[in-house]
């Protein structure tokens, strides 16, 4: 009698539960027993001549269903994905790049214990004094930045347990580091030969071969925001995507807000947190909270219609969001399977500029 070959059961991923305290710096590192994790930094930069730039860099760690106990170095038990972008008004639209590789051989990793993520020449590392070194050598641009904390981490939701839907397991562990002081340099993109911004597939999308006039290395300073989340449960099938805002306000406050929206555009779940410069936090118990579109933009690349200018109402306060550039869409279907709008926005209140942030729009 022959026996069927033994097949290991797919691993069960760890789950997010309320009441679990986050500890630092350990929780700033990777959590490989959870399905999905990301470290996500965005910010506004200023050039020496006062020109504004926006930047984004995200590292994703994705656990696969391969057995992590398999000793082979070739088993793809973890995938590392990275996105990087630079929004340069002189270029006319966002320039971005994306990379994907399996973890291994000390070339690609997300390490435990503290933030240390690497994908070839792209990396994000946190030093013992708390500052981050971020580098991405992309096809048409480069980021070489230092991010230095000026405030303690902001635990989102209930002490880091951030619910994203009505079910208790629709949640992530989530903290932010707002008001990060930035210094360093960027290599700005070349202007593509086809005109301002170039055509899809040109230097604007990380392919340097169509570049015309060269870009150059520019020293920059500014402020950034870092998010770190990890979780294992997918959102329910009626969720289409989300609107998310992280904003550093000029008075030292930090505003985070998100709306998880369904396929009909209505809110499935929403949350906001405003921490003032003294550390006091107001949460989403505000009587009214929502994102309301002010202006839409249709992508010439994917035909997607995005609400790129919005208001965010938190209680009696209304914040107006206006993009640095309309065209800040990133088509990353080759890595995460999604195209999304990820853009630098100014934040106004009662018509006055009060801060700068980043707006993310998915599921449109």
Image (tube, helix red, strand yellow):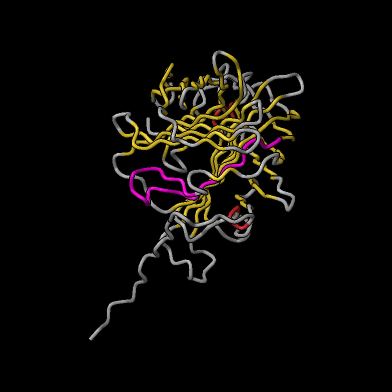
Residue 93 placed where, x, y %? 56, 22
Residue 175 included in the magenta stretch of the image = yes
Task: Give the image quarter of residue 8.
Answer: bottom left
Toward the top, the furthest residue is: 351
Task: Please identify the quadrant where the N terminus is shown.
Answer: bottom left
Nearest the camera: 197 or 320? 320
Nearest the camera: 124 or 161? 161
Q: Is residue 110 visible?
A: no
Q: Tell me what residue is drawn at x 54 percent, y 33 percent.
A: 274
Residue 331 placed where, x, y %? 46, 33
- Start and end of the magenta stretch? 161-181
Locate residue 216 relative to residue 307 in the image: left or right: right
Nearest the camera: 98 or 139? 98
Q: Is residue 125 visible?
A: yes
Q: Tell me what residue is drawn at x 48 percent, y 44 percent.
A: 157
Q: Tell me what residue is drawn at x 37 percent, y 65 percent.
A: 10
Above or below, comparing residue 170 to residue 358 in the picture: below
Residue 282 placed where, x, y %? 52, 35
Locate residue 10 relative to residue 58 in the image: left or right: left
Locate residue 84 relative to residue 142 in the image: left or right: left
Q: Tell me what residue is drawn at x 53 percent, y 58 percent.
A: 31
Task: Please identify the quadrant where the C terminus is shown.
Answer: top left
């Amino acid at each position: 009698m022959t026996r069927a070959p033994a097949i290991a059961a797919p691993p069960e991923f760890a789950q997010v539960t309320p009441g679990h305290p986050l500890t630092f710096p350990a929780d700033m590192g990777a959590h490989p027993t959870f399905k999905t994790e990301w470290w996500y930094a965005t910010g506004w930069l200023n050039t020496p001549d006062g020109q504004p730039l926006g930047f984004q860099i995200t590292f994703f760690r994705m656990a696969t269903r391969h057995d992590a106990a398999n000793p082979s170095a070739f088993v793809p038990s973890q995938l590392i994905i990275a996105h990087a972008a630079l929004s340069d008004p002189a270029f006319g639209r966002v320039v971005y790049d994306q990379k994907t590789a399996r973890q291994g051989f000390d070339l690609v990793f997300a390490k435990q214990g503290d933030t240390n993520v690497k994908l070839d020449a792209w990396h994000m590392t946190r030093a013992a004094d708390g500052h981050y070194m971020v580098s991405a050598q992309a096809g048409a641009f480069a980021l070489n930045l230092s991010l230095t904390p000026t405030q303690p981490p902001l635990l989102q939701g209930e002490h880091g347990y951030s619910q994203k839907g009505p079910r208790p397991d629709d949640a992530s562990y989530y903290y932010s580091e707002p008001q990060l002081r930035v210094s360093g340099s960027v290599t700005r993109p070349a202007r593509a030969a086809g005109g301002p911004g170039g055509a899809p597939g040109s230097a604007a999308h990380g392919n340097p071969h169509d570049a015309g006039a060269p870009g150059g290395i520019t020293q920059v300073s500014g402020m950034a925001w870092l998010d770190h989340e990890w979780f294992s449960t997918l959102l329910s099938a009626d969720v289409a995507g989300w609107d998310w805002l992280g904003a550093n306000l000029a008075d030292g406050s930090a505003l985070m807000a998100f709306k998880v929206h369904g396929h009909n555009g209505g809110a499935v779940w929403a949350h906001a947190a405003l921490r003032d410069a003294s550390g006091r936090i107001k949460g989403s118990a505000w009587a009214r909270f929502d994102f309301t579109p002010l202006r839409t933009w249709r992508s010439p690349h994917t035909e997607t219609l995005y609400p790129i200018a919005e208001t965010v109402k938190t209680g009696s306060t209304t914040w107006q969001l206006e993009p640095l550039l309309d065209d800040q869409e990133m088509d990353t279907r080759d890595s995460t399977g999604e195209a999304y709008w990820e853009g630098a926005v100014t934040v106004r209140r009662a018509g006055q500029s009060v801060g700068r942030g980043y707006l993310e729009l998915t599921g449109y």
